[in-house]
Image: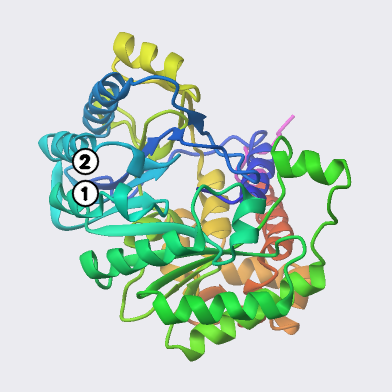
Amino acid sequence: MIPSTTRLLLSSARKLCGAVKMRSLHTKNTEEAAVYVHWPYCEKRCTYCNFNKYIQRSDNEDAIRACLLKEASTLIQLSQVRSISSVYFGGGTPNLASPHTIGAILEVISQNALLQQDAEVTLEVNPASIQNSKLHLFREVGVNRVSIGVQSFDDSELLFLGRTHTACDALHTIDEACRLFPGSTSVDIMFGLPGQSMESWQRTLKTLLAVCDDHVSLYQLTIERGTALFKQLQSEHFSPPDEELTAHMYNFARRTLCEASFHHYEVSNFARNGALSRHNLSYWLGKQYIGIGPGAHGRFVARATGGTQREARIQTLEPDPWMREVIQHGHGTRKVVEQNDLEILSEMLVFGLRTDTGITHEAWQQLSPSISLKHLFDASHKLKMLQKLELVLLDESGLRCSWKGLAVLDSLLVPLLSQLQYAWNQMEKERSPKDTT
């Protein structure tokens, strides 16, 4: 899922882009795509969650499975991609789906495009008691990687977050997953909780390092409008986390994980032994992905209808209306926006700078042959100041954030996006026909 701060920046970038008439650019690498499948149901909504999730009130898995299969077939055929590099089952709580449903979706994907032999197939998993675990069954139908939403090893923190599992359940699930998916088990952990001390965070990291596999995702708690936590905060049931302490937690965790041989390859993600999330890298590197299921997002070229430019697609949010639309039209796409070149470049900045490798000059120039990264910085005092403060690095390989720049990435993106917009407007003015009257 895209973090809320990143969504806001992308929304601002699209508003900036809206007034500019862009030339068409054929998107590169349209032969391959990743696939995201959204399972919208949970047992319970967590207190901090503002994702597109619902409580399943009746046994409708047969109906939603049929619609997921139909939409997967429709959208893959619409894209005309030849191969699928990864599949990610997110949610919601996709391990509430039956292994039969997960296997059927993988089968229909492979019927419509080549599911690469080494394709990464990830299933998001919430920890469960030993009686409810189905991990071995998911492995049998084709899942080869799991991402476990642990969030905390402290039962009081889990209760505050509204999680349905205990710390004991989390430890059991991690142990079982590491045996079934060695080297391909990821653990999500959360920091910046109200009342969380530096000492408790250190204990959490110590527990994590004692049991985790080769991939860890760190997420700062964000209290979003419309959530139960937001209402509690408004009612002054607790105080917001201290920003300085939260920043200290993040930097301490980064150092701790790196000392344990983890590679900090993205703002929130750490891997060792080469266990990077290839699916998420598709997003960060600006590759095509097809979103299937209620509320799923996608970015791909609709080549079957003669499309040449990448489209941003959003599926209908609510499961029941989405299913009706899939039954009627073959898909539940609610919104389609053809992306112009400036929007694609803006996304490249927002997502590319999340990674330690950043944006190469070659990748940038494929979309922007007239405005180089060096040109952006040479023309902006603010961007030069970011370099002087060693928050961003621009060298012969490209543009990337420094170690300390990654910690304040959102604040860096605002001047970068503004300067890109300004430079693009200037370029468009120079290209416009001169008024000879």
What's under tag 1, amino acid-wise? Phe
Residue 218 magenta: no
Residue span colored magenta: 429-437
Q: Looking at the picture, how far across and down is residue 136, in whole percent?
A: 19, 54
Using the numbered discs, state the Cα–Cα distance from disc 2 to disc 1 in whole angstroms: 5 Å
| Left or right of 54, for residue 362 | left
- Few, some or many C-alpha atoms within 10 Å of disc 2 (few <14, some 14-19, many ≥20)? many
Q: Using the image as rendered, state which of residue 391 and residue 74 is in the foreground.
A: 74
Query: Is 355 rendered above or below residue 62?
Result: below
Label 1 neighbourhood size at 10 Å, few (<14), some (14-19), many (20+)?
many
Q: Look at label 2 and name its amino acid.
A: Pro
Contact (Cβ within 8 Å) of mark 2 with mark 1 = yes
Please state if 430 lies on the left or on the right of 164 as rendered: right
Figure label count: 2
Residue furthest bottom as drawn: 259
Residue 138 numbered tag: 1
Q: Quadrant of the C terminus?
A: top right
- Upstream in the sequence, badge 2 or badge 1? 2
Q: Residue at x 59, y 56 (%)?
A: 158
Residue 394 seen in this snapshot: no
Residue under label 2, please give it.
99
